[in-house]
């Protein structure tokens, strides 16, 4: 295994970012799925609007944190983790695990070293989702972090895009944990989302929905 304490520490921090992002995605989705019933219940529209707006802004901020590269700062982002990986040949097992990850996202090259391979997979994924990532970054830069007078952003990417970005980052965390660190990966809990569903159920929402599959 390629034991690297810096890569390990950064990957642990990425896990924490992913756990928070998971909660923000879940909260945003649950409010949207149950908004009609919630408006008829005991929660005021102002509170619902505040919760959904806060989750929306947090989504943009956390996705930017996870995918951001910086020439000045040593980030715990996916690009920051990749830069921390030493350039050494991968073993057969590592190569197969990395190749399975890359193949899932349309990158079918054979890994020679983890750093260049993961960099190429990330670049291909970013190209495929450049519009969403660009809109999120613009939102973060002009609304989430500042209040730009000239900004006119009426919407952010779809829920499906949020899930796609989260899934890639989660898969990245897991392949680094398994193939490069040799520890984990840890499970990302969804306690906040399930807890919120129980809460709104206790406030009178009948059959509160956790996910889109609840409609089936």
Image: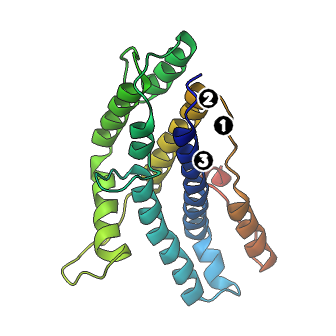
Q: Label 2 near label 3: C-beta < 8 Å?
A: no
Q: Give the distance between the C-alpha atoms of the residues marked 1 and 2, in whole angstroms.
A: 6 Å
Q: Which percent across, then down, holds residue 157? A: 37, 58
Image position of 192 (left or right of 32): right
Q: Residue furthest right?
A: 202
Q: Nearer the viewer, residue 4 or 135?
A: 4
Determine the secondary structure under disc 2. Answer: helix
Few, some or many residues within 10 Å of mark 1 (<14, 14–19, 20+): some
x 45%, y 47%: residue? 165
Can residue 156 be seen in the rendering of this structure? yes
Disc 3 designates what residue?
Answer: 12
Label at residue 53? none
Few, some or many residues within 10 Å of mark 3 (<14, 14–19, 20+): some
Disc 1 designates what residue?
Answer: 185
x 38%, y 25%: residue? 117
Image position of 174 (left or right of 82): right
Q: Which percent across, then down, holds residue 203? A: 77, 80
Q: Give the distance between the C-alpha atoms of the residues marked 1 and 3, in whole angstroms.
A: 10 Å
The vertical placement of 120 against 162, above or below, is: above
Which quadrant does the N terminus fall into? top right
Disc 2 designates what residue?
Answer: 178
x 57%, y 39%: residue? 5
The vertical placement of 12 against 203, above or below, is: above
The vertical placement of 55 against 147, above or below, is: above
Determine the secondary structure under disc 1. Answer: loop
* Quadrant in which residue 114 is drawn: top left
Q: Which percent across, then down, holds residue 79? A: 38, 43
Determine the secondary structure under disc 3. Answer: helix
Q: Residue furthest front?
A: 5
x 57%, y 46%: residue? 9
């Amino acid at each position: 295994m390629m034991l690297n304490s810096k890569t390990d520490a950064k990957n642990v921090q990425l896990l924490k970012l992913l756990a928070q992002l998971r909660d923000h995605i879940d909260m945003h989705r649950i409010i949207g799925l149950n908004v009609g019933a919630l408006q008829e219940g005991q929660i005021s529209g102002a509170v619902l609007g505040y919760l959904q707006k806060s989750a929306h802004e947090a989504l943009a901020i956390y996705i930017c944190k996870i995918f951001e590269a910086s020439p000045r700062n040593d980030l715990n982002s996916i690009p920051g983790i990749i830069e921390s990986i030493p350039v050494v040949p991968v073993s057969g097992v590592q190569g197969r695990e990395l190749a399975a990850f890359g193949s899932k996202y349309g990158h079918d090259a054979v890994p020679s070293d983890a750093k260049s391979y993961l960099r190429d997979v990330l670049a291909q994924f970013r190209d495929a989702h450049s519009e969403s990532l660009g809109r999120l970054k613009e939102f973060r830069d002009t609304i989430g972090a500042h209040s730009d007078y000239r900004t006119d952003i009426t919407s952010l990417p779809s829920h499906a895009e949020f899930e796609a970005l989260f899934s890639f980052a989660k898969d990245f965390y897991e392949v680094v944990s398994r193939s490069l660190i040799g520890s984990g990966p840890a499970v990302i809990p969804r306690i906040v989302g399930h807890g919120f569903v129980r809460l709104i159920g206790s406030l009178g929402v009948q059959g509160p929905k956790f996910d889109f599959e609840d409609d089936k």
